[in-house]
Image: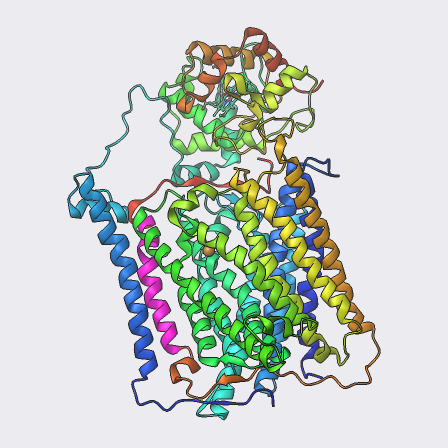
């Protein structure tokens, strides 16, 4: 068992507790929007629920899962104790207090601003203070990952940091860069407005700062899934990682191209002219590169495994893979959803085509498929893989784990495909209730019903997931010893360039690209002096 | 041991890989910036007869045309603009000073509590949003809203005093009922208030009036207003005698209401009885 099992379990259980509550809200939201009468349906309740659902899924589930998994990787991949475990607990405490503040303010109806805030809407300041505490807690995690990696390098000169840890630290570095935008927005604009110190805000500037965070945060969420693709799936399939170099290039590419691209969320916004939107669109095309590299490398690694297991012919190796292994199965399901999600993403990032889908349900459906589908299914599989190491107990049933993964994938497809379609047909997002007696939209009914069925499947799957995790804790200590955690070994190793064993030059590149991509769009607010929007306080009646 | 350590390559400095990577990233960046800020804008500009400098400025978002100049004052609907500094001054209004000021100048008609001394001709201003009060006082002061009774009283007031008075009357609330209660009214009236009438392009009154709506900052609350005043204002908007509503919002709406609708809306807004 691990030295820091309790620390890691605390993070992961908090993440999944938030997830369990938020998914019930999600189902209720689908129900309110559907043609079927839902209990407690009102616009106020709907937006309150969306705020809670988004904050819990996007901030609490992700951040705490990533922190917990990071501590796990630091201890297992580096085979040495985590530095400063006390500080890690401090980060956790900050995070949990912040998360509780968020919950309290949202459910008292004083923070119905949705999880991406939408200034000039302003909530009670304590909502934002809670979020800042979660972020500050995660900064402690970032620092610990950097210290852990530096310590290992000091003691192992001339050796490459194990890939899982290199990728985790890349994520910590990415997260530090990512949070600069939202932190600036909250600390300099939104929180002063929420306290009533300012009465009007430059909405264009707040959106620009948020866009800085908005794309990269998705990669922060996604990198654990990629770590599992590269370092866990090939190992469990009985193969080898095809190329360690390719993996490192992918993670570095996420760091570099994940950040100077956020303006693609503002294509339809008026505060920027076409030039910088186009710059960031071209850079967005390049973030497809690490994903394509990953698909290639992971497929090649799996092919090695399949052939080692006796698979022959063009595709025989696919059938030979051990699909009974939950993480191998999850990788397959995740890749499947990644095709759809990635395709949708290419549409969203195309300046012209974005106009067709902007602010429609397509966008909501897209991020559910790619994040809720491809990424979160890997969070489940990772948990199944690491829980035995945390509890010292083997899974009572792999069958139930597989059933859970299947039902999640099927549920997510059933939920999001009709949703995409309705978005293409013009269904608005962020609307609580529709008038289905209006003949213009009454044909939505069967599609909404299908989505709702998907939502029910997802809730069932989520509860099965929590059940599966809980059964580890209930199971007696198993007779067979839990095997130690092994990450995949690379087929082609050796010759890691020194530049891919640290982040100095990549940080300099990020800085240069961010200045070139964002300095003018931000400075413009001070040059052009745009009109300000009057703050709209949702936490008061006046 | 989890992973077999991988040996680092001992490439001579500068690291060959790093040089290649920086070269690649630099080249992609050059393409991104060159295409987006120079090549495409200049080509598009040529088709519209723009010179290259104007085209690039346009792509970046800098206007090369001479500025639009100041807004003209005469014929203006209202001279109040909601700039951050004006909003801060309104927010900084001092209700205690406002109370002192009101004692000598306003209470004879509006009472110390903001309810009118003559509901047939004068509005209730109790608990109105400070921004609505501030705007009306300034409009009366500037003559963009005509009110001969109040003009001599508000003309000498400074901006700070106007903000103080607005703060004072907005801090009161002497309504005898809960403004969230729905007064009784016919379905047609309720529809006009909650949804409007799409056939006449009438938005619902509630989308702008009454907290906590997301309407214009200067929209007054209507619930609890005297029916005679509401009806008189709607007729004044419809007939163009009152024209201080920015963008003609209320004039456009009131002109489409029938006299019967004006009566029933006015009765609704008197509040639950
Ligand atoms: Cu994005």
Horizontally, residue B166 falls left or right of residue A8, namely left
Q: Main secondary structure of the magenta part?
A: helix
Q: Based on the displayed image, in which of its 4 quarters is residue B196 positioned?
A: top right
Q: Is residue A102 above or below residue A388?
A: above
For the residue pair A92 and B146, the one nearer the viewer reads as A92
Q: Is residue A174 above or below residue A367?
A: below
Residue A518 among those drawn in magenta: yes
Q: Quadrant of the N terminus of chain B?
A: bottom right
Spot occupied by residue B259 in the image (x, y as percentages of width and height)? 55, 7
Spot occupied by residue A273 in the image (x, y as percentages of width and height)? 31, 46
Residue under the point 31% across and 19% down:
B75
For the residue pair B95 and B200, the one nearer the viewer reads as B200
- Hey, which residue is sitting farthest top in the picture? B259
For the record, the magenta segment spans A504-525
Horizontally, residue A369 falls left or right of residue A496, namely right
Spot occupied by residue B87 in the image (x, y as percentages of width and height)? 43, 38
Q: Based on the displayed image, in which of its 4 quarters is residue A534 positioned?
A: top left
Q: Is residue B190 above or below residue B262?
A: below
- Identify the colour scheme used: rainbow
Residue under the point 56% across and 46% down:
A420
């Amino acid at each position: 068992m691990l030295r820091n099992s309790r620390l890691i379990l605390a993070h992961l259980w908090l993440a999944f507790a938030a997830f369990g509550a938020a998914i019930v809200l999600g189902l209720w939201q689908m129900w309110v929007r559907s043609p079927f009468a839902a209990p407690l349906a009102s616009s106020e309740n709907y937006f309150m629920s969306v705020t809670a659902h988004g904050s819990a899924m996007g901030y609490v589930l992700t951040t705490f899962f990533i922190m917990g998994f990071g501590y796990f990787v630091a201890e297992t991949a580096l085979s040495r104790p985590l530095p400063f475990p006390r500080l890690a607990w401090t980060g956790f405490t900050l995070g949990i207090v912040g998360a509780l503040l968020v919950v309290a303010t949202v459910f008292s109806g004083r923070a119905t601003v949705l999880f991406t805030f939408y200034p000039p809407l302003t909530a009670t300041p304590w909502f934002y203070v809670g979020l800042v505490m979660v972020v500050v807690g995660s900064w402690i995690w970032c620092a610990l990952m950097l210290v852990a990696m530096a310590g290992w390098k000091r003691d192992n000169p001339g050796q490459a940091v194990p890939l899982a840890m290199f990728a985790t630290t890349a994520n910590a570095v990415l997260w530090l860069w990512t949070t600069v935008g939202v932190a600036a927005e909250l600390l300099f604009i939104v929180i002063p407005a929420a306290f009533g110190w300012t009465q009007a805000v430059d909405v264009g500037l707040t959106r620009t700062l948020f866009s800085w965070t908005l794309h990269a945060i998705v990669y922060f969420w996604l990198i654990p899934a990629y770590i599992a693709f590269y370092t866990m799936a090939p190992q469990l399939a009985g193969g080898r990682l095809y190329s360690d170099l390719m993996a490192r290039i992918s993670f570095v590419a996420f760091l570099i191209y994940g950040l100077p691209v956020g303006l693609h969320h503002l294509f339809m916004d008026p505060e920027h002219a076409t030039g910088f939107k186009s710059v960031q669109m071209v850079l967005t095309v390049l973030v497809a590169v690490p994903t394509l590299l990953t698909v290639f490398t992971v497929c090649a690694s799996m092919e090695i495994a399949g052939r080692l297991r006796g698979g022959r012919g063009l595709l025989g190796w696919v059938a030979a893979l051990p699909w009974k292994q939950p993480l191998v199965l999850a990788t397959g399901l995740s890749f499947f959803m990644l095709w759809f999600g990635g395709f949708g993403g290419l549409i969203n990032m195309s300046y012209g085509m974005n106009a067709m889908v902007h602010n429609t349900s397509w966008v909501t459906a897209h991020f559910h498929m790619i994040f809720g589908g491809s990424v979160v299914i890997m969070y489940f599989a990772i948990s199944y893989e690491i829980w035995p190491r945390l509890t010292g107990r083997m899974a009572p049933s792999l069958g139930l784990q597989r059933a859970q993964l299947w039902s999640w994938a099927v549920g997510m497809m059933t939920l999001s495909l009709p949703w995409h379609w309705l978005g293409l047909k013009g269904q608005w997002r962020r609307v609580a209730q529709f008038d289905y007696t209006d003949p213009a939209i009454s044909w939505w009914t069967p599609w909404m019903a299908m989505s709702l069925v998907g939502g029910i499947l997802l809730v069932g799957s989520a509860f099965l997931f929590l059940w599966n995790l809980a059964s580890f804790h209930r199971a007696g200590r198993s007779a067979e010893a839990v095997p130690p955690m092994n990450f995949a070994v690379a087929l082609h190793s050796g010759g890691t360039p020194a530049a891919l064993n640290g982040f100095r030059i990549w940080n300099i590149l990020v800085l240069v690209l961010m200045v070139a991509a964002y300095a003018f769009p931000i400075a413009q607010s001070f040059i052009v002096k745009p009109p300000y929007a009057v703050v709209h306080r949702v936490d008061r009646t006046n | 041991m989890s992973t077999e350590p991988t040996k680092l390559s001992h490439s001579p400095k500068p690291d060959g890989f790093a040089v290649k990577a920086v070269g690649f990233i630099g080249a992609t960046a050059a393409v991104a910036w060159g295409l987006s800020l120079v090549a495409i804008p200049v080509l598009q500009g040529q088709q519209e007869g723009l010179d290259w400098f104007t085209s690039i400025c346009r792509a970046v978002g800098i206007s090369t045309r001479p500025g639009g100049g100041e807004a003209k004052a005469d014929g203006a609907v209202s001279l109040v603009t909601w700039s951050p500094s004006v909003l801060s001054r309104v927010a900084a209004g001092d209700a205690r000073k406002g109370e002192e000021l009101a004692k000598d100048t306003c209470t004879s008609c509006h009472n110390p509590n903001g309810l009118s001394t003559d509901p047939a001709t004068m509005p209730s201003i109790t608990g109105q949003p400070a921004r609505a009060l501030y705007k009306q006082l300034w409009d009366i002061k500037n003559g963009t809203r005509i009110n001969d009774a109040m003009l001599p009283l508000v003309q000498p007031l400074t901006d700070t005093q106007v903000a103080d008075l607005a703060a004072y009357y907005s801090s009161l609330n002497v309504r005898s009922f809960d403004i969230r209660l729905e007064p009784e009214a016919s379905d047609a009236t309720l529809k006009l208030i909650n949804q409007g009438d799409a056939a006449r392009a009438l938005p619902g009154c509630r989308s702008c009036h009454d907290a906590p709506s997301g309407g214009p900052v200067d929209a007054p609350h209507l619930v609890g207003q005297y029916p005679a005043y509401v009806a008189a204002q709607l007729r004044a908007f419809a007939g163009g005698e009152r024209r201080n509503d920015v963008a003609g919002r209320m004039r456009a709406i009131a002109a489409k209401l029938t006299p019967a609708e004006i009566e029933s809306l006015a009765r609704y807004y008197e509040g639950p009885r």
